[in-house]
Every structure is written in C-alpha cells, then in structure tokens.
Image (cartoon, coloured by chain):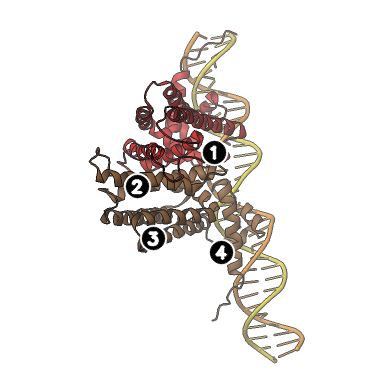
Chain colours: A brown, B red, C orange, D yellow
Amino acid sequence: MGTRANPRKDERERQIKEAALHLFSEKGFHDTTIQEIAEEAGLGKGTIYWYWDSKEDLAFSLVEDMLGAFLTLLREAESWDLPFLEKLGYLVHRAARLYEEKKDHCRLLWKFRADRHYIFNPDYVKKVTSYYREIRKSLASVIGKGVEEGVIECDDPHYLALVVLGIAEGLELEWLENEGFDLEEALQLVLGNLFSGLSRESSREHDSRKGRR
Amino acid sequence: MGTRANPRKDERERQIKEAALHLFSEKGFHDTTIQEIAEEAGLGKGTIYWYWDSKEDLAFSLVEDMLGAFLTLLREAESWDLPFLEKLGYLVHRAARLYEEKKDHCRLLWKFRADRHYIFNPDYVKKVTSYYREIRKSLASVIGKGVEEGVIECDDPHYLALVVLGIAEGLELEWLENEGFDLEEALQLVLGNLFSGLSRESSREHDSRKGRR
DNA sequence: GAAAATCGACCGACCATCCGGTCAAAATAA
DNA sequence: TTATTTTGACCGGATGGTCGGTCGATTTTC
C-alpha cells in the first residue's frame, strides 16, 4: 500500500526548527512554549506534534545539529596533513567560522547545557554526553599527534583537550555576551601562548607544569 | 509597637538558604519547587514567604552571596602590594580556594547564568549585570597595574580582563563537570603561559597579537 | 473525466497537572 | 491577652500534550 510521500515535509520541518531555534536560543527551553513556536512558524500547535514526538524531541534535534557539526569538523581535522601548530591554528579558524555561522545554535546549546539533565530524559542525556565525550576524544587525538611530532610536551593529551575545550567554551561565552568580541582572535591569542609555552618548556628544563594531570 | 527581634530569624534564613542552595544548584531554578525547598528545610511552605518575598528573591540572595564574595576578593587583590605576576598567581590561588569552598554556589550560578534574563526581573538582572561589570573592572585594574609595572604589554586591560574571565569560567565549567579536575593547576598553567607570552612578546619584536582589542 | 471514496496534513479547544503565591487560622512566645 | 511566627489548604494562571474533526488533495470507480 504505497503511502503517500509528504511533499511539504522538508519545508515544514525547516519552518518549525527555525522558529524553535530562534525562540529556544533567545529564551531557553522552559520559557519557550510550543504555542509560541507554532505561532512563529505560522502553523497550528498540533502540527508540531505531527512532526515531532515532544518538545524535548524537537529541542534535541537542534542540539544534535550543532554538536554533530562540531564533531564532524574535529574528525576532519584529525585527518588533515599539516604540522601540529598550523593544524591547530586552522582548526581554530574553522571552528570560529562554524560558531559564527551557527551563532543561534551556540546560544541554544549554552542555555541548555547547564541543566540538560532536567530538560532531557536519560536517553537523550546519554546521547548528548556521548557527543561531548567524542569531541574530547577527537581533540585529544589531534593533540596526541602533536606530542608524537615532538612539537609539544604533554603527559596526558586527554587532560589537555579538557583544558583547551574549557578555554574555548569560556571564550565562546564572552563572545556571546559581548558584542564585538572577536572569538577567533582571542582563541588564537590564548591557545597560541599556551602551546608555545608547552613547546618551550619541553626544550628548557623548567618547573613541573607540562600539561600533565 | 516595640517589635521584638525574631530570635529564630538567623537560623530560619540559614535553613532555608541551605536547602535552596542545595536544590537550585542541583536542579536549576525552574525544576526546583518552593514546596521542595520547604520540605528539605523542614518547614512549611508559607514560612519561606515570611522571610522572602518570592522564589526569585530567595534565588537572588544566593547569587549575591557568591558574586559578592568574588568581587570582595578582587577588590582586596587590587590593594595587595606584590609584583604583578606574583599577585596574579596568588589571586588565582585564592579564587580557586573560594570556588572550592562554595562549589554549590558555583553550580548554582552556572545554572542561572544562561537564562538569568528569564529567571530574574529587570531590576535583579541589572544588579547581576552590575556585579559582572564591577568584576571585570576590578580585574582590569589589577591587569592595568601590571602594564604600568612594565611586566606585560597590553593595549587594552579591559579586553584582557574579559579574556581572563572567559578562561576562568571555561575551566570552572570543566572543573564542575569532571571529578578530579584541578582547577587551580589548570588556571595557573593557562594564565601563566598567557602572561609569560605577553611579557616575552613585548621584549622581542613579534607579530601583532598583544592583548589588544 | 467526473463523482465518490480515501487519505493524511493540519488545527485548536480541551484536559490534566503543576506550581508560585495567599491567607485565615493555629501555634507559640512574651 | 496580645503579638509574632508558622502552617498548609487553596486559588488561579499557565502549559505540554491529546484527539476529534476539517478539508484539500489524491486515488479509485464507473
């Protein structure tokens, strides 16, 4: 029994996601109502439930869009054939560009991040957590190659990945909250100095801080 | 109408704040109910409204406790009579200790931060924003003294303060989310390399990144 | 090719529930 | 007794999700 294809499916999903992204990123999960999303999309409330199972479900698809894009970039970076420091610089450039392109997604992730456990049910939380873990692993692998190359000294690339992601997130926050803040410039400044510190310290005999745990 | 002082006032406020801190920091603002706070404090729901005007009001007093403590530390630091790099190192030490002591406050601030505009009414938001502004100003002043001392080169201490706070917040997040992450060590590593980069670059002739906007 | 039958996208009134805040009354202290 | 403190039943507003129904488009039938 040939079920009819829905010719408007893509357009509807786009409409709804666009409206949801706009509202969630501005007001957070709890203060955005399905009613508002429907209104902004120019559709009836019930229509949203035709395409998604729940408010949670809709929200998650937006989270996944961003985390997936970022993870994809990192995976790509793992295979770039560049000297470590250049690779890192280019990665920062690409990441900053991605953030710029998906600024609303960034805002949304930020709003959801703190209490993702109380927005999402355990299954979704597991998925989100797994994205973050994969992101850390991928970055750790990039850093690990830098260690192999002998460019930096670091006993625990996974720890350093954590630090780098922390820096990135903190600066991302400043970028979101301060008009005119140049995210890429700040990242290059801080990470540049961090890694040049880690490489210099490995040639001199220095104190004990070498990105170990 | 000689109003009697309420001998239980302090104890009650402590009980309620303690319960609220615990619940807000764990579940965020929206998913914590007044009922739950009252239960955990071992009091009736109405009693909370004897001591505070609203849920918002109670939440704000906890935010203020932390922001106030941090700002006080920074103001103190402004008056320490130490060479810049030592002052900064000690400040990081003290800040890390404060965070450790008030870890639940940190969690709470973090949960509230993203959507403070939708938790608090405009008056409270103004107060919170003003705390953050004062914190930036105070840190910028500390950094400014480092510039005056000639220890670092930096065209815009206010911008650098933003970057440093971003780093601190990002690493704070990793610390909150990763058991065993040593916040002070990470901060010293990253800020140490950042500032030693900024001082080295000012003695050599280097490229254009010098913590300017 | 026109009428009839079927389908499925869409709608929005409605329901069940939740929760911040109120208040009258009870308990306690002075 | 009077003033203060505490309580929790109750109120009203809000909202996520449901579901019966509509209607235009597609398919079938003649």
Q: Helix, strand, or loop for circle 4?
A: helix
Do discs 1 and 2 belong to a common subunit?
Answer: no
User: What residue type is disc 3 on?
Assistant: Ala
**Chain ID, mark 3:** A
* Marker disc for residue A195: 2
- Of tags 4 and 2, the one toward the viewer is 2
Corner quadrant of residue B97: top left
Instruction: Find the distance from the CA under tag 1 to the CA under tag 2.
Output: 35 Å
Residue type highlighted by circle 1: Arg
The numbered mark, 3 or 4, whose residue comes first in the sequence reads 4
Q: Position of residue A86 (x, y in %)?
A: 38, 56
Q: Please give the label number shown on residue A51.
A: 4
Callout in the foreground (3, 1): 3
| Mark drawn on residue A77 | 3
Q: Amino acid at mark 2?
A: Phe
Front of the two marks 4 and 1: 1
Question: Given the current orientation, which residue lies at the most extreme front position?
Answer: B205
Which residue is located at x 54 percent, y 56 percent?
A101
The CA span between labels 4 and 1 is: 31 Å
- Marks 3,1: beta carbons within 8 A: no
Near mark 4 (Cα within 10 A), the count class, few <14, some 14-19 or many ≥20, is: some
Q: Chain of mark 4?
A: A
Q: Which residue is mark 1?
A: B116
Which numbered mark, 3 or 2, is in the foreground of this view? 2
Q: Is residue B130 above or below residue A94?
A: above
Q: Gap in Å between the C-alphas at discs 3 and 2? A: 17 Å
The location of residue B51, given as percent across then percent down, is: 53, 24
